[in-house]
Amino acid sequence: MTARRGLVLDVDRTTPPIVFHHGEGFRFEKLPVGSRVIYPNEPLEPLEDVDSAIRHALANPLGDSPPLDALLTPGMKLTIAFDDISLPLPQMQAPDIRGRIIEQVLDLAAASGVDDVHLIAALALHRRMTEAELRHAVGDRVYDAFAPNGQLYNFDAEDPEGLTHLGETDHGEEVVISKRAVESDLIVYVNINLVSMDGGHKSVATGLSGYAALRHHHNVHTMRHSKSFMDQEKSELHTKNWRQGRLIQEAGVKIFQIETTLNNDTFPSPWDFLQKREWEMTAKDRVMLIGTKKVLDKIPRRSARSIFQGIRAPFGLTSIQAGEVEAVHEVTTANVYKQHLVRVEGQTDILSMGLPYLGPYNVNSIMNPILVACLGLGYFFNFYKGKPLVREGGVVIMSHPTPWEFHPVHHPSYIDFFEEVLADSTNPETIEQKYEKRYAEDEWYRHLYRTSYAYHGVHPFYMWYWCSHALEHVGQVIVVGGDRRAVKRMGFRSATTMRDALEMATDVVGRDPTLTHIHNPPVLMADVV
Amino acid sequence: MTDPNRRPAISHLTDRRTKASLSRVVRKVEFPLKPAETPDGETPLPPNTGANYETDWARRYASRVTRRLALSTLGRAVIQYYASPTIRGLDRLHDLDGPAIFAANHQSHADTLVMLTSIPAPWRHKAFVGAAADYFFGTRTTAAISALFIGAIPIERTSINRSTIEKAVALLRGGWSMVIYPEGGRSPDGWGQEFRPGAAFLAKQAGVPVVPVHIRGTFDILGKGRNWPKKSKAIVNFGRPLEFAEEDNNRRFTRKLQAAVESLADETATGNWFAARQRAHTEDSPGIQGPDTAAWRRRWALTDNGDNQSRSNRRWPYV
């Protein structure tokens, strides 16, 4: 059966309460008549024979790249880089697609007599992956073959011996990437392109790079001029990454890009009711929904978190392409859009969203208030093509408990950012000028990033910059059901119920506003016309 | 004083013992309480044992439930106690759909139980085992036990029996998966033997893929010559399913299957999948058949593995 396209539902009297994600729980919200609810496309049919599809992609590359086996020669240096723990979301059910691809790449390497192989988790300034996470991503066989010899490891963006400065773009952007990658005869980069921002030149230029290069595009100016950063044609972030990527290619670094797209089959049984439209839920689904909500409301947040973090998505592979970076990425982007784009007519005064338990930076971790803001105003707000879903000066209503809670191992600099920086100012530009350098070069954060499992000291700044386009665009941000102190610290307003939030929004957008709710996840991207 | 040459008197006790023998009682039982003998000159009907044993009853619902219960409780407990198997490579079966032939090397009687408890669902629940007709189906009792508890069907080892092959093909086509040992019997010394083309023939006839499986460590549990099981750690490594391609013939496919099992063996032994693949591509895999030397040196080489040698607390040698 063909997957049904997404839907823009006009709310009327018969519309049931809508299920809002609310961290590790849900809320049922009756939306006013005349509101709109945007539902995602149903999961596209996955490829049946994944191994054959991988084999075909490696043997029939796009662009001017020869097949992979023709690029592999005895005695060469091969580096295989792969996306880190931030993709996909949630983590996919084993076997992870990265591992399946890497096995085939390595099998070709083995057949060609390649001995010098390194595998690098391309995590840029993200936290290091644990052994269990690496094993999940690449599979036990690959892990056991390479990790004990030190040939499979996390990228270290603060290793002074491990980076090479390749030069500057014609716009003055420095390009610094992994020394091993530069010295390799071939880099094979294995991507999971969950959203349209992923992949392309961003893979190597960002994933295997450090602060010196990232600061040229991970900044307030770039984010404000990326409208949105999910739309490559209008993304300054994309443009700058592309300039850096082209310089890498011009420097003679050979990259064989592999990109994959997944469908949005996000929730396995028994959570699959979360994939369904409310009126299509069966009696069993409704019992599950109510029962789950009751249980989640009663149990400690820690327990609820461990339940949700245990979810593994049954994502299906919808496409795989390999070869020259730009040629590959063009096809990949079209395939991502095929799954995510939902056509929406016109903007709205108020945009509401139910934020789930998970974003790219809290896998197996805690979603702290900064990550809540980043998920809502960074990711969900920017899931548009054309123009933002909410009009300029409009209101964003986010539903999330927003606890004042941080993972002390994963997010140490976030704690100080929240306590020190946001207490002083919430203006991204002020924060950037006044605090960024100090946090980025702090020796303690650097030490934790390199030796523990901490995000880099500058990472919370990037999360806040991620919000800067939304913060500039909207008139007010309201958080429903959030911790009041945490919400206030970020400069947002708190509301206990959706009705209160709508009442508060009328102060900004007038007495008769339009409301649009994005029913996300599963992920959708609004094509606003 | 007693005369030593005197013959013992026939006592009433001795007399009674000769009269009340159980065998005498059994001998007195006649037809219809026992089967009648075939008259001289008449050809006896073929016995319902060996390759002729009819096993359809063992795939009926009640038998399947019994087998599933027995394997998931007693079978699993026994295997966990003696072999505590580590199962690897299940991710390679991710895309396997429908019935398959699971072809493993054969070291021990424990292999079948290890396989039947290691193969993942749903194949495990609808599996049958190709078992030696002369060994497992030699008597009605062993045949019934084999058919019921391991879902065995008789396979001739020494000759080609058309009906058993047809039975296996029909079951594979009917959605049943098969466990088979292409070596044709247990290893005599712990090393593997040359694969025979049975699995290839069945794969071609039934049009199903063959999953190469390598089992390590079960020889010490219940290998040839051992009557009582001994604890030893087992490792089961599942390989990527092989399809019978157009350009294949039975011999070529059998070679491919053996190479796949050898590569799995190498992978298990070294713990280095990549190095094993490199050796497989250059046809340098160590193989499962061991060195071509004297028996004691083959056995000696086998003990180099070390991982299955249970350490005895005994300080003095057995006399």
Image: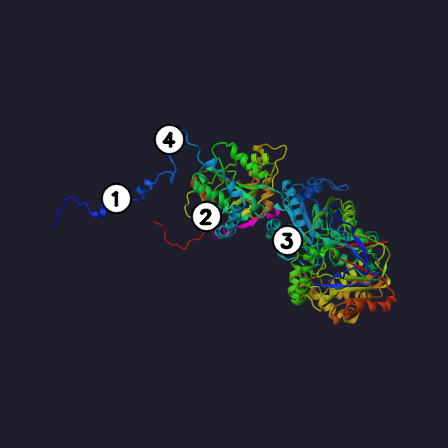
| Residue toward you, B145 or A253 | B145
Residue B267 seen in this snapshot: no
The magenta segment: B79-92
Q: Which residue is mark 2?
A: B221
| Residue toward you, B86 or A153 | B86
For the residues labelled 3 and 1, the Cα–Cα distance comes to 74 Å
Q: Are the residues under badges 4 and 2 in a single subunit?
A: yes
Q: Which residue is mark 3?
A: A136
Q: In the rendered structure, which amino acid carries the disc numbered 2?
A: Ile
Can you tell which of label 3 and label 1 is closer to the viewer? 1
Can you tell which of label 4 and label 3 is closer to the viewer? 4
Marks 4 and 1 in Cβ contact (< 8 Å): no
User: Residue A529 location, x and y as percent?
Assistant: 86, 53
User: Residue B305 location, x and y as percent?
Assistant: 49, 47
Can you tell which of label 4 and label 1 is closer to the viewer? 4
For the residues labelled 4 and 2, the Cα–Cα distance comes to 47 Å
User: Residue A277 location, x and y as percent?
Assistant: 75, 56
Q: Which residue is mark 4?
A: B39
Answer with mark 4 or mark 2, whichever residue precedes in sequence.
4
User: Residue A198 location, x and y as percent?
Assistant: 75, 52
Q: In the rendered structure, which amino acid carries the disc numbered 1?
A: Thr
- Mark 2, secondary structure of its residue: helix
Q: Chain of mark 4?
A: B
Q: Are the residues under badges 4 and 3 in a single subunit?
A: no
Q: Are the residues under badges 2 and 3 in a single subunit?
A: no
